[in-house]
Amino acid sequence: MALEEEFKNFADKVKALPPSTKDVDKLILYALYKQASLGTINTNRPGIFSPTERAKWDAWKAVEGKTKEEAMTEYITKVKELQGLNST
């Protein structure tokens, strides 16, 4: 399976993650997804009165510099981890 196809497949699987998934894990997935699909963040950091948007921006900024392929691979690995599919 091609990497992009596998990435899209796992992006669909994220919707089935349990509601108890930690916010930090959701932010990691968000950041890797954005980096893989849009590339480097290109907006200004949201203000202090938008804490959710600010956290998302910070998470995306933290993965800045990863290639599309790196972000896709890490995204897939993280989804597998959250689903309990990795043995690590």
Image (spheres, grey):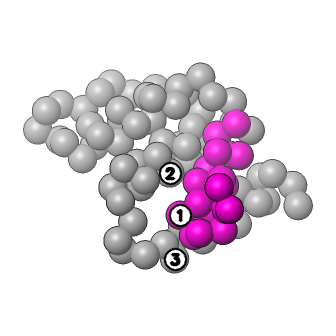
Asked whether the viewer can see residue 4, the reply is yes
Local secondary structure at mark 3: helix
Distance in Å between CA atoms under marks 1 and 2 = 10 Å
Tell me which amino acid carries mark 1: Leu
The amino acid marked with disc number 3 is Ala
- Disc 3 crowd, CA 10 A, few/some/many (<14, 14-19, 20+): few
Residue drawn 65% across the image and 55% down it: 88
Disc marking residue 82? 1
Q: Is residue 81 magenta?
A: yes
Instruction: Tell us which disc is closer to us: 3 or 1.
Output: 1
Q: Which secondary structure type mostly characterizes the magenta part of the structure?
A: helix
Question: What is the three-letter code of the residue carrying label 2?
Answer: Leu
> Counting residues from the N terminus, which is met first, the one under dot 2 or under dot 3?
3
Under circle 2, the secondary element is helix
40, 22: nearer the viewer: 22
The residue furthest left is 49
Are the residues flagged by discs 3 and 1 in contact, CB closer than 8 Å?
A: no
Query: On screen, 65 above or below 75?
Result: above
Residue beneath disc 3: 16
Determine the CA span between mark 2 and mark 3.
Answer: 13 Å
The residue that label 2 is drawn on is: 29
Task: Farthest residue to the right: give it.
Answer: 1
Q: Position of residue 77 (x, y in %)?
A: 65, 53
Query: N-terminal of the two: label 3 or label 1?
Result: 3
Q: Between residues 9 and 23, which one lies in front from this camera angle?
A: 23
Quadrant for the N terminus in the image: bottom right
Q: Is residue 56 above or below residue 17?
A: above
Would residue 61 be found to the left or right of residue 36 on screen? left
Q: Residue at x 79, y 59 (%)?
A: 5
Count of labels shown?
3
Whichever of callouts 1 and 2 sits on the residue coming sooner in the sequence is: 2
